[in-house]
Image (cartoon, grey):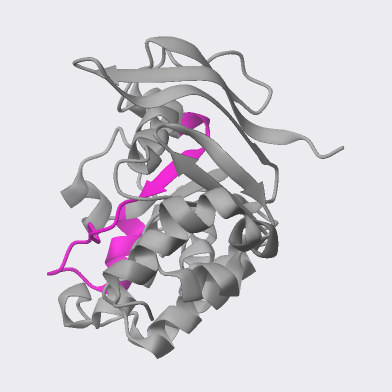
């Protein structure tokens, strides 16, 4: 039996009476790439917020690795344990080079931004930066400013910035939103290359992309797990068809 990296037990999050998560039980194994889907309001973003400490549940536990409940920890404390998050909109330093963005992402938090930029990275850190550049496919653009990158390349850069923090678990929110078909395919390949060495929890709406990368899919509905399993299992579930996939088809004109 695989060992879990994150385990949510009976987690409930309430916003003025609305239960964004409702007695949620959810497990991701070490080295796994898990995709979470569901209609708007299903609790997907709240799930990530709880794991990274941005939102605290009113009930339940969140167990990370061999740790006890991390719900009482602050965001920066949880990040130091090995949880990194990439938001939907890239948070990069557009006026700095791609290399400098990765350098800053791995900086000693006791040092300021300027001191990091003006200090030459150690040989070990330079090696880590160039390895990450190769992984995200931006080695040839290391000296370009981040603002000159395409939308997809900016997303890959931010994924690289999370990698530079050396997390055990990466939380990735809608990574292919606004991408071209080719960029979407490349992003899928990138995430699959990262999984195994790290655990990935991906929130996504693009079902073509989900089919490309997912071995196991969790469907959330009204803050709880509606269905979980392979893409084939999820697609054939009558509840999922009605609540989520059917709605997606109707919103896109039945296509």
Residue 176 showing in the rendered view:
no
Considering depth in this image, is 168 or 110 the residue closer to the camera? 168
**Quadrant where the image shows the C terminus:** bottom left
Q: What residue is shown at x 23% (from left), y 59% (from top)?
A: 89
Q: Position of residue 73 (x, y in %)?
A: 41, 16
Q: Is residue 44 magenta?
A: no
Relative to 84, is 9 on the left or the right? right
- State the residue in front, 90 or 238: 238
Q: Position of residue 108 (x, y in %)?
A: 36, 40
Q: Residue at x 49, y 76 (%)?
A: 208
Question: Viewer-proximal residue, 50 or 22?
Answer: 22
Residue 200 position, x and y percent, is 56, 52
Query: Does 23 sit above or below residue 146?
Result: above
Q: Residue at x 29, y 63 (%)?
A: 101
- Confirm whether residue 189 shows in the render: yes
The residue at the point 44 percent across, 16 percent down is: 71
Above or below residue 182? Residue 70 is above
Residue 85 belongs to magenta span: yes
Magenta-colored span: 80-104
Query: Residue 151: x and y, percent?
Result: 25, 77
188 displayed left or right of 221? right
Question: Image quarter for residue 158?
Answer: bottom left
Quadrant assignment, res 124: bottom right
Quarter of the picture holding the N terminus: top right
């Amino acid at each position: 039996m695989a060992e879990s990296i994150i385990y949510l037990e009976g987690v409930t999050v309430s916003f003025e009476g609305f239960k964004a998560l409702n007695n949620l039980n959810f497990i991701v194994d070490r080295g796994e790439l898990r995709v979470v889907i569901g209609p708007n309001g299903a609790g997907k973003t709240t799930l990530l917020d709880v794991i990274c400490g941005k939102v605290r549940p009113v009930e339940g536990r969140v167990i990370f690795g061999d740790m006890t409940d991390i719900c009482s920890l602050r965001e920066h404390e949880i990040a130091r344990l090995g949880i990194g998050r990439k938001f939907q909109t890239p948070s990069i330093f557009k006026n700095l080079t791609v290399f400098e963005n990765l350098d800053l992402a791995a900086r000693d938090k006791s040092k300021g931004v300027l001191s990091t930029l003006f200090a030459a990275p150690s040989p070990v850190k330079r090696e880590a930066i160039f390895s990450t550049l190769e992984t995200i496919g931006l080695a040839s653009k290391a000296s370009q400013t981040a603002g000159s990158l395409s939308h997809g390349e900016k997303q890959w850069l931010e994924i690289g910035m999370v990698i530079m923090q050396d997390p055990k678990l990466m939380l990735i929110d809608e990574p292919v939103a606004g991408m071209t078909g080719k960029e979407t395919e490349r992003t899928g390949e990138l995430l699959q290359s990262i999984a195994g060495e790290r655990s990935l929890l991906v929130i996504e709406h693009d079902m073509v992309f989900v089919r490309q990368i997912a071995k196991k899919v969790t469907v959330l509905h009204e803050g709880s797990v509606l269905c979980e399993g392979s893409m084939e299992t999820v697609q054939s579930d009558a509840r999922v068809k009605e609540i989520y996939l059917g709605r997606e088809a109707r919103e896109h004109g039945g296509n």
